[in-house]
Amino acid sequence: MNNHAAGISIIAFIITVTASMSYYQFVYTKEANAKPQLPEEVLNPPEPTKVSILEGSALPSQQKNFDPKEIRGTLGISNKIIWTNVDTTAHTVTSDAQYDDQISGLFNSVESTGLILPQNTFEFTFTKDGEYPYHCEPHPWMTGKVIIVKSFA
Ligand SMILES: [Cu+2]
């Protein structure tokens, strides 16, 4: 190999290394910044928490609608809530404060499921601790609250 050829292959080598380094930096940085890094058990909590939408909920006289009205979940354990509509009327689960979760998006069944039809479910994973009051859009007297607490295990 003469000097000229050696020079060209060194330059080619440098270009290749630089290109792949910036490529990986670009791809990985982008991926790392896309979503916050959260523990697997926060994203897929092992013990879902259940709420029922009771029969007669469409009537203001029915005081028990979301049951239980206030429910607590622990991050990394039970921060996924599943609502089951056992009523004969469709309902929604809609955040009072338009809570927008960093992973799950808007806390509003209308965004993902639409109306929760009889015998259907709606689930939402809260990835941050806090208090999340909600209501039903067509029946605003139907109110409930999810409280998510940090795990101190
Ligand atoms: Cu309703």
Image: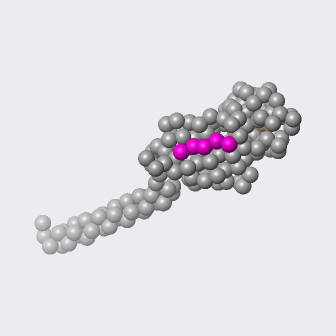
Q: Position of residue 101 (x, y in %)?
A: 61, 52
Q: Is residue 134 above or below residue 113?
A: below
- The residue at 61%/39% (across/down) is 81
| In-image side of 77 versus 21 (left or right) | right
Which residue sits at x=77%, y=35%? 65
User: Which quadrant of the figure shows ligand 1?
Assistant: top right
Q: Quadrant of the N terminus?
A: bottom left
For residue 73: magenta?
Answer: yes
Q: How are the colours assigned in the image?
A: one colour
Looking at the picture, how far across and down is residue 11, in whole percent? 25, 70
Numbered-mark total: 0
Residue 22 falls inside the magenta stretch: no
Residue at the image point whose x is 29% and y is 64% from the top: 17
Residue 14 location (% of width, % of height):
27, 68
Say left or right for 88 vs 46: right
Task: Kindly report the secondary structure that dominates the magenta region of the rendered protein.
Answer: strand
Indicate whether 107 appears above or below 117. Answer: below
- Write the start and end of the magenta stretch as one range: 70-74
Furthest-left residue in view?
A: 1
Q: Position of residue 27 (x, y in %)?
A: 43, 58
Foreground pick, 25 / 18:
25
Taking the image as shown, residue 11 lies to the left or right of residue 122, namely left
Q: Is residue 114 visible?
A: no
Residue 148 can be seen in this image: yes
Could you tell me which residue is drawn at 56 percent across and 53 percent down?
A: 128
